[in-house]
């Protein structure tokens, strides 16, 4: 297997069958790339582990950073039919991502990235990669290493944003409980510093056991920034001041 870096070339002409509502629509490569600056990431399959836990969610999370960097659209391509791609988008709540179902593998094959995954029962699928496309011309590709398994270290959203010289927002998670005044203060501090955050609520999204396992404490709020435990509202205020 040899995967050709297509940097500098035009994206291949292909036709895609798209399910829109209760009707079929036929779209072409031009519909997705002509006159636009597009980031496309391709992956082996919808609902598969790495694709669902990391690849798609991170691009969706960082969508605004891509927009700030001048990107018009972020597109996810997989050799799956439109029904599967639409259901996966709903399941992932990936509202920011345009799904591109390469159901027949036409685009992937013409690009040179259709690979045989028969050992997994997948048949022909796309190799994992990402690319920046400017008005139909591939400006940059990030291609995963050709080795067994499911390598994933090059085509992630953060790598593409670094190439675009864009600011990567800090990843913030906060564990709270309803009616907690310290949680409200922490939320106010994060908003004051323009830090968006993902909130997890006690007895809805997590249990005390989970909180203790993550933070070593039963106290809320517990704030994590870039995976680092900051602590409660007081510790967060000191961290932000620093």
Image (cartoon, rainbow, N blue to C red):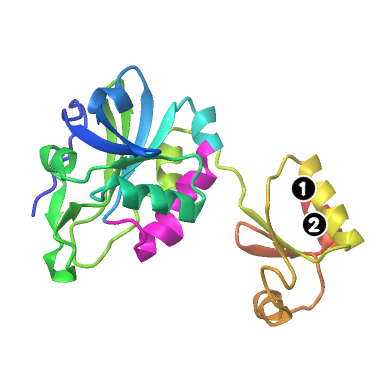
The boundaries of the magenta stretch are 45-63
Q: Residue at x 65, y 75 (%)?
A: 214
Residue 195 located within the stretch drawn in magenta: no
| Element assignment for label 2 | helix
The nearer-to-camera label among 1 and 2 is: 1
Q: Nearer the viewer, residue 97 or 181?
A: 97
Q: Is residue 165 left or right of residue 80?
A: right
Checking the image for residue 190, the label placed there is 1
Decide if residue 71 is on the left or right side of residue 212. left
Q: Residue 34 occupies which quadrant of the picture?
A: top left
Q: Is residue 236 above or below residue 41?
A: below
Residue 106: quadrant of the picture: top left
Residue situated in front as seen by the camera: 234 or 213: 213
Does residue 236 appear anywhere in the picture? yes
Name the residue at 35% across, 56% down.
Answer: 153
Residue at numbered disc 2: 236
Q: Is residue 124 left or right of residue 100?
A: left
Q: Secondary structure at mark 1?
A: helix
Horizontal arrangement in the rendering, residue 127 relative to residue 237 (left or right): left
What is the residue that sits farthest to the front in this orientation?
22
């Amino acid at each position: 297997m040899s995967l050709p870096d297509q940097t500098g070339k035009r994206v291949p002409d292909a036709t895609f069958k798209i399910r829109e509502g209760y009707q079929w629509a036929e779209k072409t490569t031009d519909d997705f790339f002509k006159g636009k600056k597009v980031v496309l990431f391709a992956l082996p399959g919808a609902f598969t582990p790495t694709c669902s836990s990391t690849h798609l969610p991170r691009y969706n999370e960082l969508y605004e950073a891509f927009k700030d960097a001048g990107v018009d659209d972020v597109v996810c391509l997989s050799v799956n039919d439109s029904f599967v791609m639409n259901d996966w988008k709903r399941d992932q709540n990936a509202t920011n991502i345009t799904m591109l179902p390469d159901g027949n593998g036409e685009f992937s094959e013409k690009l040179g990235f259709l690979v045989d995954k028969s050992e997994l029962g997948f048949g022909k699928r796309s190799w994992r990669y990402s690319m920046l496309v400017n008005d139909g011309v591939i400006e940059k590709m990030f291609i995963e290493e050709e080795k067994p398994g499911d390598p994933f270290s090059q085509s992630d959203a953060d790598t593409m944003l670094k190439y675009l010289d864009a600011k990567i927002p800090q990843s913030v998670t906060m564990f709270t409980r309803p009616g907690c005044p310290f949680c409200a203060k922490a939320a106010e501090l994060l908003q004051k510093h323009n830090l968006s955050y993902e909130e997890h609520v006690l007895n809805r999204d997590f249990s005390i056991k989970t909180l203790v396992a993550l933070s070593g404490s039963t106290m809320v709020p517990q704030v994590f920034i870039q995976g680092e435990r900051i602590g409660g509202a007081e510790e967060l205020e000191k961290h932000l001041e620093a």
